[in-house]
Every structure is written in structure tokens, then in C-alpha cells.
Image: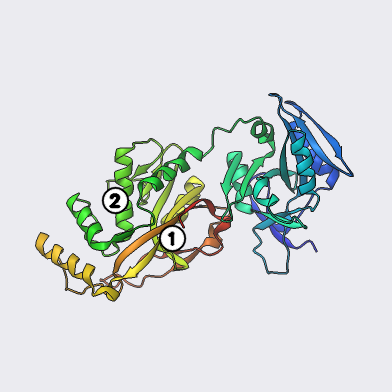
Amino acid sequence: MNEKSEQIDSRLNIIVAKDQPLSPRKLDDSVISALNGTGEASVCPIEEKHFVEYKAVGGDKHAFLTAAVTFLGGCGNHPIFKKRIQLKSWYKHATAILKNARYMVHFLGVYHYEGNLIFVDFGIETYLRRKMNNSSAFVYVNDLFRAMKDGIATRIDLHGNSITTIRYDQLAQYIEGMKPTTDLDSLIGVFSAFNRYMAFNEWIGGEDAIEVMQKHAWSKWRETEWPGWYLEFNFSSFLSEHPTKLVVYQGDAAKKTDALDFDLLFPVHKFYGDLKASDIKKRESPGNDEKSLMEAIDRYDRFWYIIYEHETVKDKDCGNTVTKFRYDLLMAVDGTARSPLSYASRMKNRVNFKKMMILELNRANCGELLSAFHQGHQPDGSKRAVKVLINKRDVENYQIFHYEVK
């Protein structure tokens, strides 16, 4: 049954409609059409099956086993932004033959809707470990959206599978090893480098973190939610030691009148982002002001949440030592503490950062990731601005990069 699901057209509009998969012959023809003009592409037999052969300009030989990208179906059991190709049982045997003949083998999905074509190159190694008895390889509508916007988009999913989505006009360049100028790999590389700088898989005590921030005159050392501010302190320090034009940490710095109030600005790629520290057991994480967030997405087409997740030990289970330490320090510095046990029930004693992920919000997916978080009223009785909650469940349609330690 061809059920309705999310589709993307050539104008980057997201539409709920039925799939329009190509026939097996047209699948191969679409690949040949996209590749011809550079190397040589044609259909070749392999035992009782066939593949698309491409002889690249540099002499490499590529073999494409093609399949249509379609919705999973299931009468509401699967999200409408999740699609797949079926991995045929004969792929494994064919791959062995082709590799022996010195071909570079690709499991290539072909997405089609209203004439819009996007190719999906599924890194074969993780799939070859399976029995390949009509199993599936998954791709998400946001992966397709990013390909349409950026030309080529690559990510590793949460199961370790490599997924590259390629706009029709970029397939030849991708196979020949040339990348489009809009690639975001260099920006993601900044956070990969920070992950090596940041303390992962070790316990960070609140007393130590607060004391370090205070000694370095970090303006937010007084705040109760110290893990998030300690994360920002470390990221700011990292950028000071490893300057780059790709990322600006805005923090509390004076912003231009037309600037939006977020932690991070990516001036080269022209959009905003925000750093978040979040308890790894929590299924949701507080986000930003809803109006500002929607304005950022509308104005710049994308927004990044960079979420660092940590294990947590509560201070109330440790004799409130961090709460008391913070109170004593506040009193010693400027006498601003309210009471010795203020915020004690929610204070964190220590945290252990275990993983991070970059979630991209854009007009293709932002409505599904976020929910409203009403904060009540200001001290003067006026309503606080509505904030969003970031849903950390089923994040594959938003996650473009992740890092995890065991």
C-alpha cells in the first residue's frame, strides 16, 4: 500500500503525499543520466541481475546497485519523515564479485517526487554485516532536504551507518571526489575538535567548576545551572585558544540591534546556534524563546542545537555540598546569596559528559522536534515569553552529527 508521507519538491517544499518511485529501468536511467558527460556509465549484467557501471575520469570503476527510496508504511506505526531502500538478499554476493573485479560498490537509493531526484549513497560496510534478507537502510526527509539545499550532505546515523544524500546535479562531482562549496564539514570539524578538548567520561564536580569560572571572571559563575555555563566557559576558552572565523561565541557580549540572542553565530555560513547541557536521562531539554527561534529559522533557513548530554548526581543526595559552597562563595564575594539552601532540590553535585549531538532545525523539520514550554509569570505579573522544549526522542530527522563515549 502506497501511504501518504512527507515528500520534498525541487523548490524545497515539504508536502504530504504518496510516494512516486521510479521503475527499476528508470532508476538506472536516472543514474546514467546524472553521470554521463563526465565518465562513462552503462547498465551491465552480473549473473542473473544487473548493475550500473561507471568508469570515472580518473580511472576508478564504480558499481551501483540501485533501489527506490520509499516510505515504510505501517498505517501510522512509523513517522512520515522516515524512508528506506530495501537491501536485496543478492546484494552481498554481488558485492563480493564486484569487489573482486576492483569495483567501488554503492548501494544507491533514488528518491523521486514530481521530477525531483535525490540520490542516497548508503555506506555498504555496516549493511554487509547483516544477513541481507530483504532488510532496509533508512534515510530521513531532513537528509533529503539538506541535499537539496547544500548539494551533498553526509552524516553517520545513531547506528553507525554512513548516509550521503546527493542532489541530482551533484552526483558526478560526488563520485569524482569533488564537493560543493556549501559543504558544512569544516564547521562540524570545529565541534569535533572541541570534543577532544572538553572533558568527556570523567566526573566534574560543581565546586570545582564554579570555582574555576569565578577565578576566570566568567560572568555566569553565580548561576545555579552550572553544567551549562561550565560548558559555555570551556567552549569560549577553546575558541580563544583555537581561533576560527567559522564560529563566534556571543555569550553576554553586546549584540548588534538586528542580532538574535543566541550563544553561537556562524558568520561564514550565515546562521545561528545554541549550546545546551542536558541530563542524559531526560527525554526533553529546555530550548530558547519560541519567537526568536522561529525568526532565526525563517531568516536564515537553519538553526543548530548543539546538545551535550551528561550523567548526573544530585546535590541533595550528597549533603547539599555544592549548594552550600556556592552560598559561601557568593557571600564572600559580594553578599548576594538569598539563603543557604536556595535551589538545593535541583542543584547538581557532579556531572559526567557522555555524548553530544548537533540537531539541525529548518523549515522541513522544526515543527516535529519542538513543543511549547510555558514558564508562568514574571515577578511583576506579566507573562514570560514562551520557550520551546527540545524533544530528544527519535532525533534522526534532525541529527546531523553525534559523538559518544562508552
Instruction: Inspect this view and state whether residue 203 appears.
Output: yes
- Binning the other alpha carbons within 10 Å of mark 1 as few (below 14), some (14 to 19) or many (20 upward) gives some
Report the residue marked by disc 2: 233
- Name the residue located 81 percent from the left edge and 50 percent from the top edge: 90
- Binning the other alpha carbons within 10 Å of mark 2 as few (below 14), some (14 to 19) or many (20 upward) gives many
- Name the residue located 30 percent from the left edge and 38 percent from the top edge: 241
- Quadrant where the N terminus lies? bottom right
Q: Secondary structure at mark 2?
A: helix
Percent of width and height locating residue 358: 48, 52
Q: Nearer the viewer, residue 405 or 195?
A: 405
> What number is the disc on residue 290?
1
- Name the residue located 75 percent from the left edge and 47 percent from the top edge: 114
Q: Is residue 281 left or right of residue 157?
A: left
Percent of width and height locating residue 112: 74, 47
Q: Nearer the viewer, residue 228 or 271?
A: 228
Q: Residue furthest top?
A: 58
Q: Quadrant of residue 285?
A: bottom left
The coloring applied to the image is rainbow
Amino acid type at circle 2 is Phe
- Name the residue located 37 percent from the left edge and 70 percent from the top edge: 375
Amino acid type at circle 1 is Glu
Q: Is residue 91 left or right of residue 82?
A: right
Percent of width and height locating residue 127: 68, 51
Q: Secondary structure at mark 1?
A: helix
Q: Is residue 84 left or right of residue 345?
A: right
Q: Earlier in the sequence, mark 1 or mark 2?
A: 2
Instruction: Inspect this view and state whether residue 65 appears.
Output: no
